[in-house]
Image (cartoon, rainbow, N blue to C red):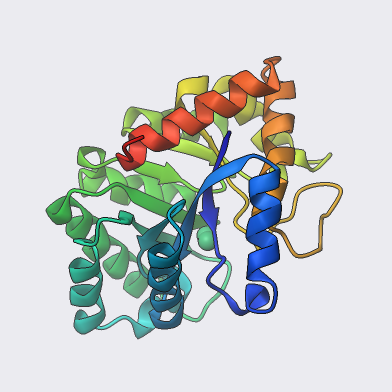
Amino acid sequence: MLFDTHTHLNVEQFSEDKLEVIDRAQEAGVSKMIVVGFDHETITNAMKLVEEYEFLYAAVGWHPVDAIDMTDEDLAWIEELAKHPKVVAIGEMGLDYHWDKSPHDIQKEVFRKQIQLAKKVKLPIIIHNREATRDVIDILKEEDASEVGGIMHCFAGTVEEANECLDMNFYISLGGPVTFKNAKLPKEVAKEVPVDRLLVETDCPFLAPHPFRGKRNEPSYVKLVAEQVADLKEMEYEDLASATFDNAMRLFGIKR
Ligand SMILES: [Zn+2]
Ligand SMILES: [Zn+2]
């Protein structure tokens, strides 16, 4: 049993063959998945998918790259959607200093507003962080995000930074990069973070694991991530899979 905690089955890369992709995931043992919405179109699509498939759940939020586009109406819409029984997290949200579409101060403001919203609706948050780890951790501290906790998605920081996130009630989620030969930090993090605080994800269609690097990623490949993490932790694959599955169920408050 595997839980892919970060998919974008709601984007156009899956519009042609979504059914086959979902079938392959189930054949690989991926029995639950989160569909992450991050703007108008992808949130709308995520809600459609989770209403159609019992084993899919949604996270709704606004991506930092597009922070400049988010209006107060969008925030109110996300708050309304948070009441839906299949919306289990707010996000993805955070900071992304790689792309320069949205100025840093606007990204920070939109990030803070979404943390405050999550605390209001009492849902965990999913954090997107690219090249902004220090600012992300500082804002999580200042906003008392530990009250809701959540996920550091596709974590790329150091073991020390991972520990700071664990102290704030966050889980560390590892994706495709942990399988790359030259990915030193994710491998160290996989070894050091306790198994009861680890999650696995694909972030599909992005970041496909080895040997599919550069190709379209899909949820069935989360098995390759879990196998790599089990190897690094010197654990049986089945034990790693069931531990990360249980972690996700607990974090998202999903009843069996
Ligand atoms: Zn992301
Ligand atoms: Zn994402």
Question: Vertically, is 5 above or below 70?
Answer: above
**x, y percent for residue 110:** 29, 69
Nearer to the camera, 110 or 32: 32
- Is 178 on the left-hand or right-hand side of 169? right
**x, y percent for residue 188:** 66, 27
Question: Vertically, is 256 above or below 235?
Answer: below
Task: Identify the image quadrant of the C terminus.
Answer: top left
Nearer to the camera, 97 or 203: 203
Residue at (20% x, 43% y) in the render? 144
Number of numbered callouts drawn? 0
- Is 250 on the left-hand or right-hand side of 84? right
**x, y percent for residue 195:** 52, 21
- Is 23 on the left-hand or right-hand side of 63? right
In this orientation, does residue 35 appear? yes
Residue at (65% x, 72% y) in the render? 14
Residue at (68% x, 61% y) in the render? 21
